[in-house]
Amino acid sequence: MQAARPIGSGSPLARWIETPEGVVLPIELGQRGERAVAFILDFLIVFGIIIGLYLLLIAVILGGKFGGIGWLLAVVMLASFFIRSFYFAFFELRWQGTTPGKRAMGLRVIDRAGGPLTPQAVLARNLMREVEIFLPITVLLSGTFSGQIWQTLATIGWLAVFMFMPLLNRDGLRVGDMIAGTWVVAVPKGALFGDLAHGEAAEDAQVPSSSQYSFTTKQLDAYGIYELQTLEGVLRDRRPNAGEVRAEVARRIRAKIEMPEEDLADADTERFLRDFYTAMRARLERRMLLGVRRRDKHDKR
């Protein structure tokens, strides 16, 4: 695993991360407070869904439409368990590392090694949440209602260890993040370069919106959705060293797709990357219309 390096004198949350292709990119870790708010928002959604299920069960019972309620209660309890356990994993897999709460706070889960976020990592970090939070809360409530003071105190200690873990390491990692090899990072603010296909970011990039570079189908098929999202982050970056990063990314892309190597001015570098992004996005979208969703460059579809 390639560890990221601090960015020096910048923000204490700033890091470099090196992708498997050898491209070094700047990222910013999500603030602990923002992560806590994102979790609370997601928790309220989960809690609201579960409460809704139980209210529906109560309505069915009061309506007297079913003679045997035991199996309905079992179904509701099982559904509640799956919602609680897989809500986070479902959204992080479907929404590229985000949940409704994380989207609201501008956060995203990424792989600390710089590679694609794998289903195994998503499941590992989120199943650990059961041990970190949900299970001790269940035990805490059980001990409180049964009057077992020592069980209650032990469970509070259990919760405290896991809840304060992000405060005890410089990267703000949960135990789930440590096991899964993930980070929660801030999504770069600024113009969304998904609009590049329509020329809306041309003024910000200070280059014309018309396409200057053309690419073959073989060249566009060198990468997948993950690399497209990575390139989007590079184009959106407006930090002081962003020009150097874009120049290095452009050089590696040209080498990968076997285009002639040449020195590019800053405007030409951004023009090349923007044209390549637009063409690759269009290619991937056309393939998705045909039912082919290519996740990354390793996906041979």
Image (cartoon, rainbow, N blue to C red):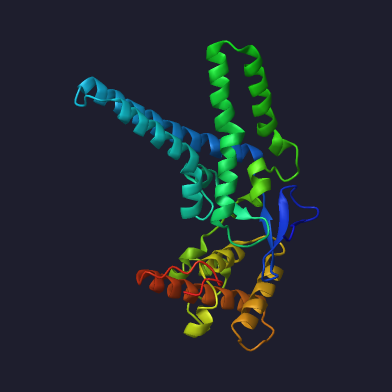
Q: Does residue 173 appear left or right of residue 129 in this picture?
A: right
Taking the image as drawn, is residue 85 in sight? yes
In this image, 232 relative to 285: left or right? right
- How far across and down, in percent of the image, does residue 81 sit? 45, 35
Please name whichever residue, 244 or 85, is drawn nearer the observer in this view of the structure.
85
**In the picture, residue 150 is in which quadrant?**
top right
Q: Nearer the viewer, residue 137 or 96?
A: 137
Depth check, front residue: 248 or 270 = 248
> Extreme bottom residue here?
260
Q: Is residue 99 above or below residue 292?
A: above
Q: Residue at x 63, y 12 (%)?
A: 149
Q: Position of residue 261 (x, y in %)?
A: 67, 87
> Which quadrant of the figure contains the N terminus?
bottom right
Image height of 160 relative to 93, above or below: above
| The quadrant where residue 137 appears | top right
Q: Position of residue 241 (x, y in %)?
A: 72, 64
Q: Residue at x 54, y 39 (%)?
A: 38
